[in-house]
Image: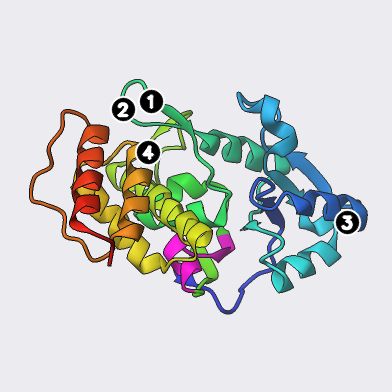
Amino acid sequence: MIDAHMHDAMAQWLLLDRPGAPQTAVILQQSFAQAHQVSLFDGTEWHALREHGPLLIDLRTCPALADACQHDAQQWRGLLLTSEASCATLLAHLRRMLTVSFGLHHRALLSFYNPQTASYFFDACDAAELSRWLGPISQLRWFGGTWADRAIGSQGWQQLLNPRLAVRPLAQEEDLSFRQRENLQTCLLEQHAWHWSQATGSDYSRLWLSLQEGLALGFSERAVLDGWLWLRLQYQGAVPPLSLEGNTQQERLDNLRSRWQSDGPGV
């Protein structure tokens, strides 16, 4: 992935992350009504969510919006695409990217149109995988970075160029590689730490370390992990024992809380 300070070609399409910036839908209708747009979820298994899903917008039908995307990327969140393919071909490919599988019985919506998710997912692709996932897209750009980047204010323009290797076409419900799954899991965990830092006013780096510490202690259930983070904020100087007593994650957390409370106030 390239940090793109200069843009080689004007993007022809915006894949607008409407879920990530719902207010832009109103601005789109008020100020850029002439822009041709299609809901990415139309005709897919996510059709019921189409009113709240991403939009594919033809920037060639609205030069003013194309300019706005370059100068106010924080508001127009999403991916800027360059492609010589027809709208129908591009839509078909993007819709194949929506539903992915991992393992024998697991399927999920891949929100690749979200700038944060894109920063993790495409970074996990090698040249062959990138050729397959980009398909008819020759260039992909977005303003963003990881959740850790966002926490420290170091987001920037990202750019991907299609290696165009000879690979098989993207399959329906493409299987995610181990590295892709691993990066997306990191995305979810770092997002969780970011939300906690925003909600509590705590330092992101410290919260991220606490979250990793909780996972190492075996607190993988969401409610228990949240309980651990709250406990850790209260007892930042306490040292967890090498082993925790209890038959369940919740019991082990409760026993640890009782132990720290009996030891005195948090540091």
Tell me if 201 is positioned left or right of 262 in this view. right
Q: Is residue 144 above or below residue 100?
A: below
Q: CA distance from mark 2 to mark 3?
A: 43 Å
Q: Could you tell me residue 116's position as x and y percent?
A: 51, 56
Q: Is residue 136 above or below residue 115?
A: above
Between discs 3 and 4, the one toward the N terminus: 3
Residue range (magenta): 140-152
Q: Quadrant of the C terminus?
A: bottom left
SS for callout 1: loop
Residue 91 seen in the current view: yes
- Residue 32's disc is 3
User: Circle 3: is it few (<14), some (14-19), or many (20+) Cα within 10 Å?
Assistant: some
Q: Nearer the viewer, residue 82 or 195?
A: 195
* Residue at the (39%, 47%) spot, across then down: 184
Q: Which residue is mark 2?
A: 103
Q: Amino acid at mark 1?
A: His
Tell me if 260 is positioned left or right of 62 in this view. left
Q: CA distance from mark 4 to mark 2?
A: 22 Å
